[in-house]
Image: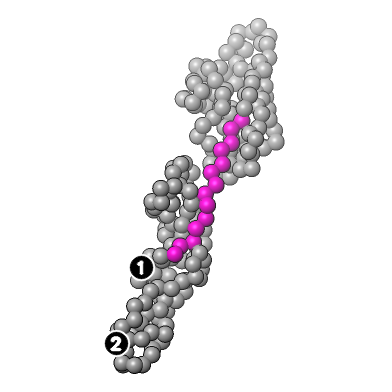
Amino acid sequence: EFWDGDSYALLGRKGFVSGLHTVVESLSRAPSGLRAEVEVRCPVLRYDVYLKTRWGTHEFLNSSQVGVNSLLVPAETRSSRATSAQIHVVSPIGLQSSPGETTIFDAVALVSDVEFAEEPDDGSDANELDLRGVVSWIPPPNASVVDSYRVYLSSDSSGTNRSLIHGDIPFGTNQMEVPSGTSREHFSHLLVYCVSSLAEQTTPVS
């Protein structure tokens, strides 16, 4: 309810994106001494998602259309400065001032103690450049987001000129036999990557 000349604000259920279905405005002019109540239905246009940093600033991430209640954050999205994600309802009147918010949990998972137990060759020329043996590793202590592993040959420990030996080794298996006939070529390192349901990690262990 408003009196003539009263100020007004957009109202929504704080913390719940789905709660903002209506907004309230005062009458531009109401007869003096009378009270008036006006409810204006305001459509939701989209949802805007922002990253809130540790310094309190906001970085726009992406938008989601009405009817889509989730947003896939692309792999390798930089989030080192972000502490939470905020979801704003956008209407024709503007951006919701009290967004929904969720804390960002950034998990890091790296294997350790990668070892290669090489099998001796039989002395034939055909096997001189072949890699024979078993790669093993210790799973990461925080493995809640790990679905599988991938093993590569590489020219260095960072993955330069890498070549996949075996992909999608199920989580719980901590070793693999190098397939027969795998050539050493110019490679000097074996790399193990953790893989989640979203992407392969960028930093391997050799």
Hey, which quadrant is residue 30 in on the image? bottom left
The residue indicated by pointer 1 is: 94
**Measured Cα–Cα span from mark 2 to mark 1:** 23 Å
Secondary structure mostly seen in magenta is loop
Answer above or below: position of 72 versus 125: below
The stretch drawn in magenta includes residue 32 = no
Residue furthest right in the image? 172
Front tag of 2 and 1? 2
Using residue 43 as the reference point, say whether residue 178 is left or right of it.
right
Answer above or below: position of 115 versus 91: above
Callout 1: SS: strand
Residue range in magenta is 98-111
Hey, which quadrant is residue 25 in on the image? bottom left
The residue nearer to you, when weighing 204 against 102, is 102
Q: How many marks?
A: 2
The residue indicated by pointer 2 is: 29
Q: Residue at x 49, y 70 (%)?
A: 13
The stretch drawn in magenta includes residue 105 = yes
Q: Residue at x 54, y 20 (%)?
A: 189
Using residue 51 as the reference point, say whether residue 204 is left or right of it.
right
Residue 69 visible in the current orientation: yes
The kind of residue tagged 2 is Arg
Sequence-first disc among 2 and 1: 2
Residue 176 visible in the current orientation: no
| Percent x, y of residue 37 | 41, 87
The residue nearer to you, when weighing 98 against 157, is 98
Callout 2: SS: loop
- Graded by Cα atoms within 10 Å as few (under 14), some (14 to 19) or many (20 or more), the crowding at tag 1 reads few
Q: Residue at x 52, y 49 (%)?
A: 104
The quadrant of the image that shows the C terminus is: top right
Q: Are marks 2 and 1 in contact (CB under 8 Å)?
A: no
